Amino acid sequence: MAGVLVYSTKQGLALELISAARKIDETVWAVSINDDNLAQALAAAGARVFKISNPDLTVADTGAVAAAIKQVLDKVNTDVVLLSSDRRGKELAGRLAQVIGAGCLTDVTAINVEGSKIECQRNALGGATIATQYIEGPKVIAIRPRAYEAAGAGNGSVEELAVEIKGAAIKVIDFKPKAADTVNIEAAEILVAVGQGLSDEAKLTDIQDLAARLGGEVACSKPLATDKKWLSEERIIGLSGKKCKPQLALLLGISGQVQFTVGIRDARVIAAINTDENAAINYMADYIMQADLHDVIKELNEKL
Amino acid sequence: MNIVVAMKQIPDLQQIRIRNRKPVLDGVPAALGIIDKNALEAAVLIKESQGGKVIVLSAGNEEVEETVKEALAAGADEAFLVLDDELDGADGSVKALVLAEAIRKIEDVGLILFGEGSGDNYSGQVGSRVAELLGLPQVGYARSIEINDSSAVIVRSLEDGDEIIEVSLPVIVNVLGDINEPRIPSVTQILKAGKKLKEVLELEDLAIDLTGLPEINMVSNLAPETDRKQVKVSSVDELLQALKTEGVI
Ligand SMILES: Cc1cc2nc3c(=O)[nH]c(=O)nc-3n(C[C@H](O)[C@H](O)[C@H](O)COP(=O)(O)OP(=O)(O)OC[C@H]3O[C@@H](n4cnc5c(N)ncnc54)[C@H](O)[C@@H]3O)c2cc1C
Ligand SMILES: Nc1ncnc2c1ncn2[C@@H]1O[C@H](COP(=O)(O)O)[C@@H](O)[C@H]1O
């Protein structure tokens, strides 16, 4: 094992990977694809960067990216690759693992080096449990965004690398940016989270009002963002959303399925308001109120 | 053109209990992955407008033969199953080899759909591995799929925006849970499901070598300790008082 190779299309996440890689080995190799700024930033954080510039290579083509990274791995002779577990990274993880005959773990929240083993933690059974696993043989490990701090300044280098790519199998015909929601619910001290118990979209203003009074942020369960589209996906708490640890989480009309609770179980105080006395969320709460959330919000907004 | 949908049998997560921080899986009924049902619905919608067959593909233990009926009732025409106890809980690298080899045996496949992640493991790697094994292009996190003759236009939803992709068939697509609302089969459909064609193979019927694969070892698998007060409050005033005492408001 000679070092660790890291790759992400996003600069912030790639810098986090460098921090994670340093827990495994001092030597950190990195790859940038058609992105000079990324190459410079990674070198400035101490990585030895292979800069690939090839107009035939698009990061949207997972197969081609995996083939390119394989060519880098042939040069550096390491069998440990860290990717970011954002959507691009997760999609690439399995493909790259297959190309290099590696085992693959995604959505890893922490790594610990125990002798020659790299022990990885990840949610299992939909989030009901935390599994600690390690891979024997070559490894592709995709690490959850913000599991590690971005690496600080270091002394790296940039080397250009030509790769051979078969004709692109995938054509990107358009990209439609999402309306930016820059909220960071992971950093909030107070979260007011709503679920499908909320009767209609118009009532969201009351929730926003309450969050503002408490000095917190609005968050939600997944269906509110992905099915109903009432809030942005940035605000989802849970397995496919964010893992939060606020001082206070006020949970309104959320049933408490495991894929949700995995994202909030590190909160210091949880208060749950639900009309169902037997809602699963009650077992996860410090304070349980069986009531209609709409009445409770109204009263809270009057009294705060 | 036929459409293959890969669906995984998982334990019904809502019914898993935790004892001494360990998950108790005994007696927990089997179900099909939730997002895999979205993949099936996407396939059935395409079939309804374009024709062809929807073939559900699953690798797992003997129980899958029963579990898969739900998919046959919800619109799949046939099932292709590889059943072996060894496949229960097998790693993604093993399952990918099995699924890829099974797909090679199915005729005229234009589209192969996967879920974005399986319900229990949610690792999102099996579809990508199968794509590599079959040498096919792949598009993950799809929120819409449109087929035009020999190509597809797929919207891949990323954190910061939607990427519109054109790709020629056959292609592997991993769908998002919000691509559609899966239909609930009617009683007649459930009754008819038992009669639909099922091709059942065993591991040894496939020409694959499962030796020398990377191994994933489990050190521990525990529920986090939860120690919540679970105090019932009966009024907003009581709630506010409690939160003040906690020092959080
Ligand atoms: C692979 C996978 C990943 C997932 N990831 C996530 C994730 O990251 N985050 C997530 O949240 N979900 C996730 N889910 C979905 C999850 O399983 C649940 O479907 C979801 O959390 C349910 O959201 P909910 O509690 O808002 O809705 P419901 O389960 O419908 O609950 C609504 C609740 O509101 C209560 N209620 C109704 N009316 C009122 C009222 N007037 N006042 C007060 N209470 C009321 C009801 O009693 C009920 O308890 C995932 C699922 C899968 C399969
Ligand atoms: N045993 C299996 N049989 C059929 N399909 C599977 C199996 N395991 C995983 N899949 C498919 O691969 C997808 C991703 O699984 P995973 O990599 O475990 O998250 C699932 O949503 C299914 O579509």
Image (cartoon, rainbow, N blue to C red):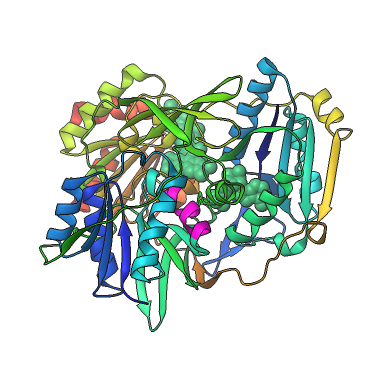
B168 in the magenta segment: no
Give residue A300's quadrant in the image: top left
Question: Which region shows up in magenta?
Answer: A90-99
Direction from residue B206 to residue B132 in the image, left or right: left
A92 in the magenta segment: yes
Residue B23 appears in the rendering: yes
Spot the residue most to the right. B195
Q: Residue shown at 76%/23% (left/top)?
A: B186
Q: Position of residue A277 (x, y in %)?
A: 50, 40
Residue B118 appears in the rendering: no
Residues A260 and B106: in front is: B106
Q: Position of residue B187 (x, y in %)?
A: 80, 25
Give residue A56's quadrant in the image: top left
Residues B227 and B141: in front is: B141
Q: Residue shown at 84%/48% (left/top)?
A: B200
Direction from residue A221 to residue A54 in the image, left or right: left
Residues A56 and B127: in front is: A56
Q: Residue shown at 84%/40% (left/top)?
A: B198
Q: Quadrant of the N terminus of chain B?
A: top right
